[in-house]
Image (cartoon, rainbow, N blue to C red):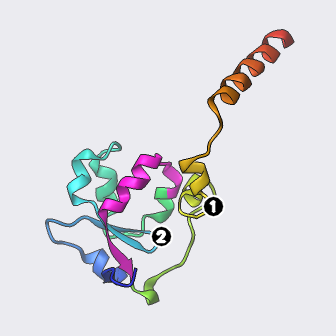
Amino acid sequence: MANEKQFTRSEVMKNDDKDTMMFILHDKVYNVHSFLNEHPGGEEILLDHRGTDASEDFDDVGHSNDAMELMKKYQVGVLVESDKTNQLPKKGWVARYNSKEGEKYIRGPGVPFYLLVGGIVLGAAIIFYAL
């Protein structure tokens, strides 16, 4: 988006206003101050990453699809072009989530329920008879 507020890394690092708690995830800037008390992992982990590029740690943890959607609410801008790393998320579900390719993993079509149940039953039967 061309109208997004742009930040430098040093602006994010300083964010000492009492109503901000900013960090960077994959060249996007988030202010999660209003989310601190709601974060399932506790506010300490967010506070530990205040003013930093938390991309690698974020990718390593594993967040739900709901968390990924909720993040959009807290994005306040992007890094200026000269401060961007243009580093993609690590391989795995975060990378799939952030790509057009990943939409099929998140929003469907998914595995039909009957195939899922059938696979589980078949797997259980194979294990049972193998014993």
- Residue 8 marker: none
Mark 1 or mark 2, which is nearer the start of the sequence?
Answer: 2
Locate residue 26, reporting x and y percent: 47, 70
The residue positioned 58% from the left and 46% from the top of the image is 108
Percent x, y for residue 1? 40, 79
At horizontal 41% and vertical 47% (from top left) the residue drawn is: 66
Asked if the stretch drawn in magenta spans residue 81, the answer is no
Q: Quadrant of residue 48?
A: bottom left
Up-down: is 122 above or below 94? Answer: above
Label number found at residue 26: 2
Q: Is residue 33 above or below residue 37?
A: below
- Please state the horizontal and vertical placement of residue 47, each as a whole percent of the image: 28, 58
User: Number of callouts in the render?
Assistant: 2
In the image, residue 22 above or below residue 115: below
- Magenta stretch secondary structure, dominant: helix
Write the residue at 59% across / 61% down: 90
- Which stretch appears magenta? 59-79
Please indicate whether residue 108 sits to the left or right of residue 30 in the image: right
Q: Residue at x 55, y 49 (%)?
A: 106
Q: Residue furthest right?
A: 130
Residue designated by label 1: 101
Q: Quadrant of residue 41?
A: top left
The three-letter amino acid code for the residue at tag 1 is Glu
Quadrant in which the C terminus is drawn: top right
